[in-house]
Image: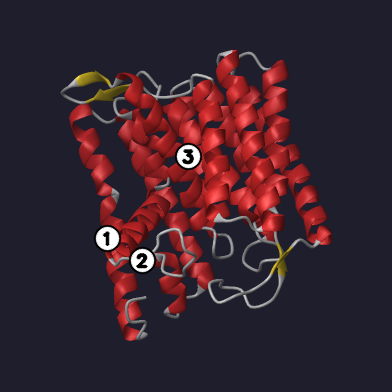
Amino acid sequence: MTLAAFLRHLAFCAALAAISAVMVRAMISARVMDVPNARKAHRNPTPKGGGVGVVVAFMLGIAVLYGTATFSRIADPYFRGVILASAAIAVVAFIDDIRDWPFTVKLGAQLLAALAAVGSGLYITVFRLPYIGPVDIGWWGIPATVAWILFATNAMNFIDGLNGLAAGTALVACIFLALIAQSQEGWFVYFAALLLASGLAGFLPFNFPRARIFLGDVGSQFCGFVLAVLGVAAARFGAVEMSFLLVPMLLSGVLFDVAFTLIRRAVAGERVTQAHRSHLYQVAQRAGMDANVVAMVHWGFAALGGVVALLFVHAPPERKPMLALLLLVPQLVWLAYVASRARRANLGAW
């Protein structure tokens, strides 16, 4: 890619960030309020739905990409599947921000959006593994891809509980994903990651360090869904063994927190679909850690995942599993630290 082309991309992204900011400001005026309750960290009613700016910026950008770009296109069925599924998840999540639907309704809508993406042909059937080579799992790739999309979508939704945490983490992940995709000439993933980053860049100043508006389900679910779909597309980088791990590495902090919390609650016999405040990031904040610091810790996890992912791309095949597992170390350290603070704060079983 030439410097001139890169600068054009940045100018286009800056324009989308400005559009996102305008939409976020409009949503503040619309005053779709998030009312505090026992499971939320904020104390005063605050507007939500700021993710509308992220969605509008991304969808405008993807429409331009679909209509005019040639270097960054994927096959039309995949392209249409991404656009329609992303729009569907955004609309349903925005209605949920207004009506506060039960989790089962949200999950059903997410499932339909995931099936729309998979139905367009965007799913994984072949995993390229070191020492073993390509492993074709056939039709099992369809439910595996759907499960990944649902988990990543909800993980980003669950992690959106402190100012700037979800949006900042997704922004860092998008920047690194664009860098990785550019190095592999995965131009659709590159451009789509930049588009999502643009929308988040327009939103984040309104949400961190002080929140004038929250991302809302429309933003958190949308970001999780788009990153999950880009993870499926990145899994097709033919020159990189185990490329299906790239986006999970970028979201390692989010995925670890959600997976650990779900497992811990299931083992304790709690309903995993019931609202709670026992995610690690929530426990850290309840134990006295500054909320902005907790958010920046997760930004750091995403940045570390990005650095390791860049090394992963160029590492010899035999070292890739070790690099991926390396990201568990900071998560285990974080878990130990949060548990220690919880004990000192007498939070009991959280």
Residue 176: mark: 3
Image quadrant in which you'd find residue 142:
top left
Q: Nearer the viewer, residue 177 or 162?
A: 162
Residue count near mark 3 (Cα–Cα under 10 Å), binned few <14, some 14–19, many ≥20? many
> Residue 86: percent from the left, percent from the top?
62, 35
Q: Read off the residue under disc 1.
A: 332
Assign a secondary structure to mark 3.
helix
Is 290 rendered above or below residue 319?
A: below
Q: Which residue type carries mark 3?
A: Phe
Image quadrant in which you'd find residue 80:
top right
> Residue 175: percent from the left, percent from the top?
53, 40
**Looking at the image, is mark 3 or mark 2 earlier in the sequence?**
3
Answer left or right for 295 relative to 201: left
Q: Nearer the viewer, mark 3 or mark 2?
A: 2
- Kindly indicate whether the residue at mark 1 contacts the one at mark 3 (C-beta within 8 angstroms): no
Q: Nearer the viewer, residue 84 or 58?
A: 84
